[in-house]
Structure formats: structure tokens, C-alpha cells
Amino acid sequence: MKRALVTGGAGFIGSHLVDALIEEEYDVAVIDDLSTGSLDNLPPKGIRLFKGSVSDAELVREAFSSHKPDYVFHLAAQISVSRSVREPAFDADINVVGSIRIMEACVREAVKKIIYTSSGGVMYGENPPVLPTPETSPCAPFSPYGIAKLTGEKYLAFFEKEHGLRWTSLRYANVYGPRQNPHGEAGVVAIFLQKMLRGQPVTINGDGEYIRDYVYVQDIVRANLLAIDRADGLALNIGTGSGLSVNRLFGLLRDQTHYRQEAFHGPARPGDLRKSVLDSSLAKTTLGWSPLMGLTEGISETVRYFEKTT
Ligand SMILES: NC(=O)c1ccc[n+]([C@@H]2O[C@H](COP(=O)([O-])OP(=O)(O)OC[C@H]3O[C@@H](n4cnc5c(N)ncnc54)[C@H](O)[C@@H]3O)[C@@H](O)[C@H]2O)c1
């Protein structure tokens, strides 16, 4: 039986990946400190949980030496861009040092490949020269969160050159779907849905003409599975290539939840990009990946989940 280790496996995206790996008959272990993830996202049995931080060298060593994974999916992260701006050292402890600890452990335990989680939304700077943006656009992250994600990719190249570690980095667009945490600052679909289903007022930051590329969580899971034996040494955008404004997203969600209220407009969030849409042609040619889930259907699935859990 092949063994997989998923860091951040109790989180939104990681837990869907855990489900898919179990379905594919992997023996799965998870490292998660449960800071934003939850045990409720994990199957009740059949996985090993190492509870603690990826920046804890001892915990990482123990997880790797006892589970001996063939493949590592590194999703654990401090995911708040604004927290990274307020507390850059905290962010770097998890997103840089934690990632290095995971890569060191991959080398130590001769892991066959690591699939690293990056972000396309923050990678290409405030004004990407081309939309949809391909990977050939200059990387110009401006938040510590984005700097850390790019730094992780540079360390992957280092570990490959120095130790032969195989890797693929997946630069996700804005991911949405069931299990997304509606309490954070990211995850606008989850935040709006929970408020709509509770009949609470919804506030859109700024004028709502911020354009994002929304990709469904199962499409992200599929990209991770495809990367197991493809696209070595590449950083790939994983998005739909289509942009949607927050105002239009609000309208779509309102139709599907039969919410009657208008949105309030609050102050713009400092540092929010005006437009982010990813060109994923490289993922198509190297991974054989393109998104399968349409936005309307993906939102219906997400609405059904939040109706059950709200
Ligand atoms: N959701 C998106 O739109 C999006 C977009 C681009 C990239 N990403 C990346 O995808 C990954 C998963 O994000 P998500 O949206 O599922 O968020 P999430 O918060 O649901 O998942 C993160 C998981 O990591 C765990 N974690 C946090 N700090 C940890 C630490 N120090 N040690 C161990 N575990 C820790 C959390 O408890 C949680 O289970 C992250 O790397 C994130 O940066 C997400």
C-alpha cells in the first residue's frame, strides 16, 4: 500500500485531498495543529493524525520516521494575508521555516515526491501585466504571505539540486467549496453563504469590482493527484482562466439561497488586488489538468453543504 502524508489535512482543501487519497487506497497520515482545521473534517478512522506544528522539528521527524510516506502533500500554512502583514515573523515561522522542515524530512526519509501548495492569487503582484496571467509573468508578491509561498518554491529548487528531491508546486487561484471556514478573512463564498443562510447582512469590501478566479475544491484535489507522477520541477497555475467580480458573485449566491437583502459596502481592504485571473495552460499540457466544475454547479454543491451545516 502506498503511503501519503498530508500537512494541513484537517483543513478545508487538505481534508478533501485526504478523502480522495483514501479512496485511491493510500495509507494516509496528517500533520495538523488544528489552528484553523478541525477534526470534524477528517474521517473518523483510517488515518493517523500527528497533532502539532510543521515548524516543530521533533513532531515532523516523528511523523515522517513512523509513517514513512512515499508522497507528501504540503498544505499546512498560516493562510491569512493580513496576519502576515501584521506579523511577518509568525507567518515565516510556519510558511517558510515549517516548509523547510517538511522538505528536510522529505530528503531524510527519501520521499518519492513532494507536492507543494502555493498561491497564484498573490504571486504576480498588484498589477499583473497580462490577464489571465501565465507563470511566465514576473513573480512579484508584496505580502509576507506571498513572499513566503515564493520562497518555498525557491527552497524546492534548492532541495532538488542539492538532494534530488522531486517536486511540483501548485499555485491555486481562489478556492471554494464545502468545508471552507466561514470565520476567516479569506473564503468569500463561505463567508457570504453563512450570512445569507442566517439572514444576516452581508458586507462587500470596497466597490465590489474586485475580480477573482474561483476554482472548485475537487478540481484542486484532482490537480494534486495528477501531480504525483507528472510535472516534476514545475510551478503551475491552477485556476479557471475566468474572472468574476465580488458583486456578481454576491448576485449568484443570492439567487441560489433566495436571500432578499441588498449588500452593504464597507471600506476597501488595504492591499486587495483589483484583478487576479490565472492562465492554467501549462497545467493542461504538463498535468493534463483543466477545471471540470462549472461555477454555477460548484456553487450549488457549496450551498447544499452550508444549508446542512449552518
Ligand atoms: N483557500 C484558498 O483559496 C487558497 C488559495 C491559494 C492557496 N491556498 C493554500 O492552500 C492551503 C490550504 O488552505 P485552506 O484554504 O484549506 O485553509 P485551511 O485553514 O482550511 O487549511 C490549513 C490547515 O493547516 C493547518 N495549519 C495551520 N498552521 C499549521 C501549522 N503551523 N502546523 C500544522 N498545521 C497547520 C490548519 O489547522 C488547517 O487545517 C494553504 O497552504 C493555503 O495557503 C489556499
Image (cartoon, rainbow, N blue to C red):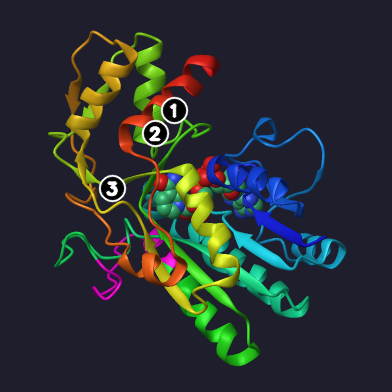
Comes first in the chain, label 2 or label 3: 3
Q: CA distance from mark 2 to mark 1?
A: 6 Å
Looking at this view, name the residue that lies furthest to the right. 66
SS for dot 1: helix
Q: Is 145 within the magenta?
A: yes
Residue at 70% across, 34% down: 39
Q: Nearer the viewer, mark 2 or mark 3?
A: 2
Which of pointers 2 and 1 indicates the residue nearer the eye?
2
Residue located beneath label 3 in the image:
213
Is label 3 within 8 A of ligand 1 (CB to nearest ligand atom)? no
Q: Residue furthest bottom?
A: 162
State left or right for residue 177 relative to residue 143. right
> Magenta stretch: dominant SS?
loop
Q: Nearer the viewer, residue 148 or 237?
A: 237
Bounds of the magenta span? 134-149
Q: Are marks 2 and 1 in contact (CB under 8 Å)?
A: yes
